[in-house]
Amino acid sequence: MDPESLQSQKVCTVRRNRHLTIVIKLGSSSIVHEKTHQPLLSILSLIVETAVRLHRDGHRVVIVSSGAIAVGLRRMDVEKKPKHLPRIQALAAVGQCRLMALWDSLFGNLRQPIAQILLTRNDIADRNQYQNAQNTFAELFNMGVIPIVNENDTLAVSEIRSIGDNDTLSAITAAMLQADYLFLMTDVDCLYDKNPRINPDAVPIEVVEDVAALEADVSSAGSSLGTGGMSTKLVAARLASSKGVTTVIARSSNPGNIATIVEYCQSIKKGQQGASSQPLIPADEDPLSNSTPSHRLDISKPPRHTRFLPDPEPIRDRSFWLLHGLAPAGTVFIDEGAHRALASKAGLLPVGIVDVEGHFAQQEAVRLVVVPRKRPSPSELPDGIATPTNPSIPPSQSDPESKPRLEVGRALVNYSASEIARIKGLQSTQIESVLGYADSEYVALRENVSLIKRDKGGNRPATPAPASLASSVASLEALLPQRPSQEDLRA
């Protein structure tokens, strides 16, 4: 068995061995007061009690915690978040110590050991480090430890977020662990089809089956202490759902609802499995069957929440890493024939490449974008190279620049940007005559290509809602505290 399969098997064991894996994400506004930066001990204590209870019921629990910068502001008596990046990173370094001390103190009262895991984009961009992180999580779980994850703000250099925000970090963490649930705890209880403050008939949206339906009009920032907003939560839900993770938006002030929502969701799964001849979770391995009678919950009317259903055909671990673990260094434009070949599990050949953009080296990640091909003139080709033929594309094809571009995936390339620019549109047998060498006949091997999964229509039913689902995001934002503009948040 190849190492990739062994790694996947090891992580899969995490979710099959008589327990669930639950990732709980807390934003800065759930941890500290937005104005005074005082830690919200009442909420944090409830979070700790909930996490410990889930852990003692046999589940694996991970907390993705924001708040380092906010705690640093209070420790250094700074009123507002500065805009100078080194100052923000210094405050994060101060606050991270205090924040972990606070978590350790609260969990210590219940004799629960915790661990700190700091991540940056570079930590997951390297495949070996990505797998090492998986192994570290697995060993911490085996030791009975609850990991607390945060992005390493002292090293991140892009708007104090190299990954993007802790919503995205929580989704990547959940996917890395092949988690069962991702809870995005926020200031409101769920999504609504309309603003409930001005529309008494606003209907809560309990289930979202197609995250894309919610992405039509999402543009707002997070709190003055954080970097996320509702748009980042929808992005996180889309990422996690694509990996088979059930994502839940719930109110952070009632963290005890997490256990009830989990049991409610598990009861739904049991009902769906009842009709099948072989349950997905055997009765003697149901994690919730380990709960003592005193822990059994009333799930006849679950707490209000919004649940994003997982993709019934989740992408593989390596495919997720290629799509979301790597930052693309450039773009390779391919024609429709190359896209069809990739969809048929073939590699990317130079003949299917139309153009290249950016500066990148071998084995760096690039975007794959489909554009129509314009037949090149002989003057555009190297001397002695015949014009490539493609009978499916008429000579009168219009300029690709005038056509819509569609990103279809990501790839690790075998050639640099300058090399691809020289061999684009050529047969693989011509690579050596142009470059003087030929490391591979493929610009990208198929195993190093991950295509974006798109709904082909009818695969998943549309999310029911009385009004445009895009308005539900605006309605949810209207319930949150006033947010600064993006300009105010830029460092």
Image (tube, rainbow, N blue to C red):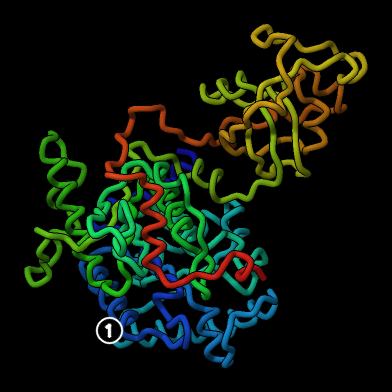
Q: Residue at x 63, y 66 (%)?
A: 487
- Of the pair 417 and 347, the residue shown nearer to us: 417
- Which residue type does callout 1 highlight? Leu
Q: Is residue 38 above or below residue 243?
A: below
Question: Split into 4 quadrants, where in the image is the N terminus?
Answer: top left
Question: Split into 4 quadrants, where in the image is the C terminus?
Answer: bottom right
Image location (x, y in percent) of residue 268? 16, 48
Residue extending furthest toward the front: 198
Tell me how many marks there are: 1
Name the residue beneath numbered marker 1: 110
Image location (x, y in percent) of residue 168? 49, 58
**In-image side of 350 versus 116 (left or right):** right
Image location (x, y in percent) of residue 148? 43, 72
Residue 134 showing in the rendered view: no
Q: Residue at x 34, y 54 (%)?
A: 247
Mark 1 Cα-neighbour bin, 10 Å: few <14, some 14–19, many ≥20: few
Q: Is residue 290 above or below residue 440?
A: below
- Of the pair 14 and 194, the residue shown nearer to us: 194
Image location (x, y in percent) of residue 419? 81, 33
Q: Is residue 352 above or below residue 361?
A: above
Q: Residue at x 20, y 58 (%)?
A: 287
Residue extending furthest toward the top: 391
Residue 212 showing in the rendered view: yes
Q: Is residue 159 above or below residue 203?
A: below
Within the image, what quadrant is residue 443 found in?
A: top right
Q: Residue at x 36, y 72 (%)?
A: 145
**In-image side of 204 versus 163 (left or right):** left
Helix, strand or loop at label 1? It is loop
**In-image side of 83 versus 220 (left or right):** right
Residue extending furthest toward the left: 293
- Of the pair 236 and 323, the residue shown nearer to us: 236
